[in-house]
Amino acid sequence: MSTVLAPYLSFRANAEEAMEFYRSVLGGEVTSNRYGEFHMGSPEEADKIMHSQLVTPGGLILMAADTPDELDFTPGTNFSVSISGEDVDELRGYFDGLSEGGTVTAPFEQSPWGAVFGMVTDRYQIHWMVNADPAGSDG
């Protein structure tokens, strides 16, 4: 098995909803475990997501969890998620889907480095960068 980089996103009680949204945009299957399955956290948080993973047919991996109430949670301030590839139409579909209910911060268009690139903050305040480079240089 090769080494992969998988972003891990934190939410506050809506990881399940967010992962279903990402599955609807990116495709693939989501698997999840809840705090209660492992007898972790408070009884009030037993149904929250302890770990969730989305694996797409194209090999993208996205992980997420609900941050327990006793831990600090500040959404959208310390990371971005980048999706890069060669298929402009596929990546445009991801960009358009992530934009639904979100805010486009840079339109998905030709970039100075030759790729088609855009940035969006989705409805969950997650920052995304989408880079489509048909030449395969992953600009």
Image: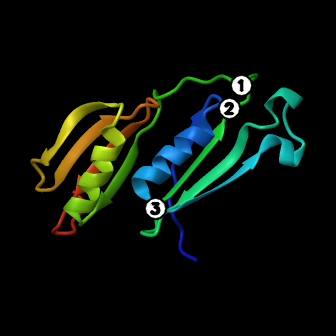
At 46% across and 29% down in the image, what residue appears? 76
At 55% across and 23% down in the image, what residue appears? 74
Q: CA distance from mark 3 to mark 2?
A: 23 Å
Task: Give residue 70's position: percent from left, percent from top.
Answer: 76, 22
Per the image, the residue denoted by label 2 is 67
Query: Quadrant of residue 89 in the image?
Result: bottom left
State the SS at label 2: loop
The amino acid sitting under disc 1 is: Leu
* Mark earlier in primary sequence (1, 3): 3
Task: Give residue 101's position: percent from left, percent from top.
Answer: 36, 31
At 31% across and 58% down in the image, what residue appears? 84
Nearest-to-viewer mark from 2 and 1: 2
Nearest-to-viewer mark from 1 and 3: 3
**Label 1: how many residues lie within 10 Å, few (<14), some (14-19) or many (20+)?**
few
Per the image, the residue denoted by label 3 is 60
State the SS at label 3: loop
Task: Determine whether 121 is above or below 64 in the image.
Answer: above
Q: Are marks 2 and 1 in contact (CB under 8 Å)?
A: yes
The amino acid sitting under disc 3 is: Leu
* Mark earlier in primary sequence (3, 2): 3
Per the image, the residue denoted by label 1 is 71
Q: CA distance from mark 2 to mark 1?
A: 7 Å
Task: Give residue 43's position: percent from left, percent from top.
Answer: 88, 30
